[in-house]
Image: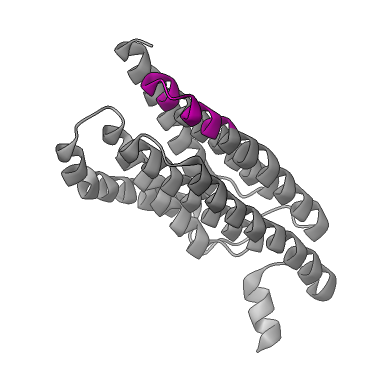
Amino acid sequence: MSDSLYVLLLDLTCGAFLLAGVLVLWRRDLAAIVGLFTLQGIALAALVVVLGVHEREAELVVVGLAVGALRAGLLPYLMRRALVAGGEVRETRPLVNVSASLLVTALMAMLAYAVSQPLIRLSPTPATQAVPIALTVLLVGFFVLISRRRALSQVVGFLLMDNAITATAFLTTSGVPLVVELGVSLDVLLAVLVLQVLTTRMRAAFGGTDLDELRELHD
């Protein structure tokens, strides 16, 4: 792979990775949010594969395919099942509206760019120059986690943070050992499986998964 093609593909995959994360803040339909998470999983897998091909590391390509199978295949499938079981279709009342959320995202992007500059100066490669994108998605995921009310939306925020941490690891180290990635992925898979069970039981017991309404019931 030539250097120019490598940079082009790296920019495309990182751009898709960031766009999918930002659009989660724009959509309120839960099925669409799960779809955007799927697209981000595809972008993350493509990013890892591009790095593997450029570094000529077959193991990294295999890891990229495994990441795609889990984060663009199995996890979205489990979340769709939880969505159907829970009976919820929309994020009705987020704590921060869409316009303000996009403004906050712009501020978080500038913060991520400023924070990552010392790291980029240490090793100004095309991969490390994309680290601000991964840090922005990390902050976006945290913002989704604290500003959305539905349990599934908050889990998507947690998974966005996990995707961002994974992307940062690959961009800064040119890959992590396969056993480490599999161990982290299994932890995330377990968390989503627990979510599916809890969402179904919350829906059956309380009629919904709005966390504010559940707090009112508790009070």
- Residue placed most toward the observer, 63 or 84: 63
Residue at left offset 62%, top offset 45%? 33
Residue at left offset 16%, top offset 39%? 122
- The outermost residue toward the top is 2
Does residue 141 show up magenta in the picture? no
Count of numbered tags: 0
Residue 67 picture quarter:
top right
- Residue placed most toward the observer, 205 or 28: 205
- Expressed as whole percent of the image width and height from the top left, the position of residue 128 reads 28, 35
> What residue range appears in magenta?
51-65
- The outermost residue toward the right is 204
Q: Answer with left or right where residue 55 lies relative to residue 129.
A: right
Residue 214 picture quarter:
bottom right
- Expressed as whole percent of the image width and height from the top left, the position of residue 85 reads 82, 57
Quarter placement of the N terminus: top left
- Which color scheme did the rendering employ for the protein? one colour
- Expressed as whole percent of the image width and height from the top left, the position of residue 200 reads 80, 64
Quarter placement of the C terminus: bottom right
Residue at left offset 38%, top offset 24%? 10
Q: Answer with left or right where residue 204 lies relative to residue 53.
A: right
Does residue 53 show up magenta in the picture? yes
Magenta stretch, main secondary structure, is: helix
- Expressed as whole percent of the image width and height from the top left, the position of residue 179 reads 52, 45
Q: Answer with left or right where residue 96 lies relative to residue 198.
A: left
- Residue placed most toward the observer, 203 or 78: 78
